[in-house]
Amino acid sequence: MKLAHLADLHLGFRQYDRQTPRGGNQREADVAEAFRRAVDDVLAQRPDLILLVGDIFHSVRPTNAAILFCFRELQRLRVGLPDAPIVVVAGNHDTPRSTETGTILRLYEALGVEIAVEQPRRIVFSRLDCSVLAVPHQALIGDDRPALRPERGTRFNVLATHGQLPGLGEERGTMEYGGALVTRETLAPAQWDYVALGHYHVAHQVEPNVWYAGSLEYISPNPWGQLQDEQDGGRAGKGYLVAELPGSRVTFRSISPVRRHVELPPIEGKGLTPKELDERIAAAVAGAKPAIDDQIVRQLVFDVSRATARDLDHAAIRAYKARALHFQLDLRRPEVHRVEASGAPGRRQTLPETVREFLEHRPLDADLDRAEFVRLGVEYVAQVGQEGEGEGGA
Amino acid sequence: MIDKASFQPPPIGRVVATEQKPATPHQFHFWTANETSIGIGAIVRVEGFGAGDSGRVVYGVVTDGFAYSDLATPLHDVVGAEGDPARAAEHPTVRQEIRLWTAAVLRQRPEEPLQPVPLGAVHVASDVDVAQALRMDAYLGGEQPTAIPVGLYTSGGLEAPVYLDADFLLGPEAAHLNISGVSGLATKTSAVEFLLASIFQHFPPHKGRVAAVCFNVKGPDLCFLDQPGALEDEDRRRYERLAVQAQPFERVRYYAPFKADGVNLNTLRTHPDLVGDVEPLVWGLREVLDYAEVLLNRDDIDAKADAFIDFLADRVVDKEFDDGFGGAHRVVTFADLERLFRSIFDGLELAGRGDTWRTHHIATIRKVRNRLSNISTRCKGLVTDDGPSSDLPWGRFEDRAVYVVDVANVDPLGQDLVFARAVSKLREHLERRDLGVDAVVVFVDELNKYAPGDGPDTYVKKMLLDISERGRYLGLVLFGAEQFRSQVHRRVVGNAGTIVFGRMDSDELATPGYQVLSPATKIKLATLPIGELMVRHPHFTQPIFVRFPRPGVLRGRDGVERFPPAADLPFEDAVVRQLVKLDRRVRPNQVKDLIADRREEDVRRALAHTRQARPQDAFAHFKKHLGGRVAAVPAAARESVAPLNRISDEPY
């Protein structure tokens, strides 16, 4: 059996004030386009079962355009893959705060889509000899939390739920706020053939048979952090998962990006004049691959004083902003170094800094080149540090 | 009873000194009438008289006795009786006979100048004399007395209470108590039980709060400390004389691991009337890993294994961890750890990267893995993956409470682990002064086994040495008991401020540690009756024999007869019992319906959470943690969906 695992579509997500030619929010259109491309790929993959694990929409009351678009895409799937059941689980973004609000997801039941919004559902697909326990966000945070355990009766048992594993995405703040907590203990991976998770926006293997599919676009929180998380996991880009059961062979299906998030090489601004810094930024923009036009771009500059920031060439910066869909010039103020022994604000010196300071003041023979002496000392310390990290692992 | 009135009883003897047997500042000899009430161990008072000695008082304890007559040689007696023992009684005159006693000096008043014992009259010691002789006056009175009754000094129908100094029994001046004696008389355990009761009733308020942690390492010895035992009138009288109430302990908390099934407790205190107050002792990976050194035997102890265990504890457990082969792990349980190990071994094999992972050699990794999986297999009821840990109430210890940790039926490896962890935690909390009490008495029986004088340096032995040497500063006091003191590590017994001897084996008495005792004292020790002990305490310059009453608690053997252990319950019933214990409103059938067809590990986990939370509505809490069942529903029949017409206005 082959299943497609998608999550965190966030249709209706809006960002920045750039508009489409039709007057809509460009990022909202980007998110929709990513889903369209994913559906195209799913149709090509022809899975037996399709799981949409939470946060179909970015809000409980999505835009009309998002509702309509979702209807079209689900209808495409139903027409293109008439035998493949579609199971939709509501995430925290889809969950109404009060019952009177209702949910737009019910609309898609008319297309034959299985929906779980408030209560968990164990849906048995006899033809596939598979049962899917669909557990929405509301069921996980409620008092009557269901036991996330399979039952006998079918060959394959799949769990689909939307929640966050403690610790995941904490380092860079890439785990979305407000998810229901699930632990490995509550998920009991060994008891399932496959566990499809949503909520974390980076594709991530929790266990060989437990996966987050990740979002289809770089949406909040901290898309730049998501890029780094992806890099750590050795899996670039956004997409969805195809899992083959039994054995849980999982393939990440990358979706070609609608728009790039371009991180320009960070600039160390310490000691640079405004003019020099302008030149560096201009060089970074000129060397950007892809070019910054219509992309989402961030330029990080460290150690920039308030005075330097004020005297930058703002006309040029405005030009960059005009070219890019969004250009973020992230100027970081210098860190305050400790001057006095105690009580002073700031940070402790790193080991190389301490070594440098010591070597710069140490008495030397007159025939020694101090600059070279200091450079070599700091370089050796840095080398040792890197070796130590390399050995330490993790 | 000793006469406390001003009436001065006549002397019972007189000090004699000859060139052969002179009186010295530490020893003297005295004679008594043939009909005397004193014997070995009796305390006597010598009053000096005449120039220089008037007003001097010397207290001594009888250590040896002699009897002889004016007979020149035994042959003279044979000749006098014409070889017939029956005619010996027909002597026209009775030979003069002497009873000569040797006494060791306990104290001289005044203390300076220290001189030989005066040749004065010898009196039987009164209550006051006993207090003076044993220097108990220093801690019996005053504004903040620190006296703990230990037993009754008894001699010739007279008796006087003997007290230990709490500053020297429980720190900080000295600490620890060691008790040795042959097994089978229940003297050692009984003495400790009585002494604990005495400490709880007499521990001075200005010294703070005190508790005891007792490791029950064999049978039902300490399983019924909260139940009253049978006492005789003589015991009650002794209790009254010692001003200790004859009653079981008011606050006793029992802890025992589960059996392998994870729901039945591994203790002999499983009678339905009693099992309700036994708390489970259950530890998870984190608790075990912090003390993993315990699991390593002498051959295993190396820096590499230590380093790898530290690596696991610091970098892996409870953290997101990348194994370097593309696998992400969050190790919380033993099962997670096993998965990580497998991943490492598989990864190394597939990658062909040699035999080193993160600078750790694969042999070291395998060794640590084997030890850890070994403990989780051999001590399944103690070490578990199912739910939160259940532990002693660190930080919430109650004043005058006894915490009994029953590990009698646990694998020896598990016993070591329990002991090492419990004592380490006690030490940590006492160092931070946040245990809830200021002093803790740790009672460990069978020191021969845990801190032997020879054999390997185990982690447990190191812990015992550490308590012995540093514990008194922290308020961590070791009460150790063993059969053969000579076989316990010298630094463990050597650091015990108070030493108690029960009936001793002759072979044991022949070992060098008992050379300071006189032959008569050794003989008395070898024949001590139940309920009598010899005590050495820093204030006493000589060992003193005391009698103590039977403890006011049910003895283990009697307890098992009165409260026979219940048979193990089936899983469902054991779960019900534990929930009912938490909340009497829980209906058994309701629980059984709920857990029917559930996996036992899930039930155990929910039960552990409920035990830990102790909610008002235990069933609701248990049900919530177990999670509701989701009934299977067949998917609705799907109509085929026809392609739609184009929408006149595409949304994006």
Image (cartoon, coloured by chain):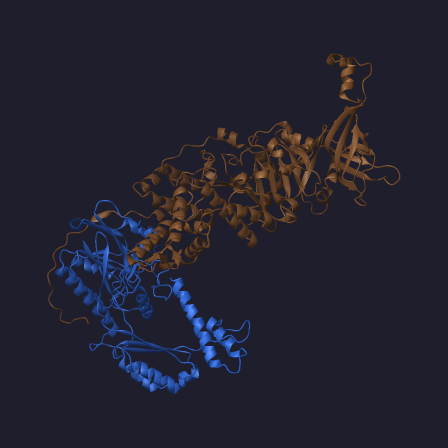
- Quarter in which the C terminus of chain B is drawn: bottom left
Q: Is residue B410 in view from this perspective? A: yes
* Nearest the eye: B291 or B514: B514
**In x, y percent, where is residue B53?**
85, 39
- Quarter in which the N terminus of chain B is drawn: top right
**In x, y percent, where is residue A103?**
25, 60
**In x, y percent, where is residue A259?**
24, 73
Q: Please say if A276 is above or below B122.
A: below
Chain drawn brown in the picture: B
Q: Please say if A87 is above or below A239.
A: above
Find chain A in the image and tell me its colour. Answer: blue
* Nearest the eye: A335 or B619: A335
Q: Please say if A72 is above or below B379.
A: below
Identity of the residue drawn at 55% across and 46% down? B464
User: Which residue extends farthest right?
Assistant: B51
Q: In the drawing, does residue B141 fall left or right of residue B296?
A: right
Q: Is residue A99 in view from this perspective? A: no
* Nearest the eye: B299 or A251: B299
**In x, y percent, where is residue A194?**
25, 53
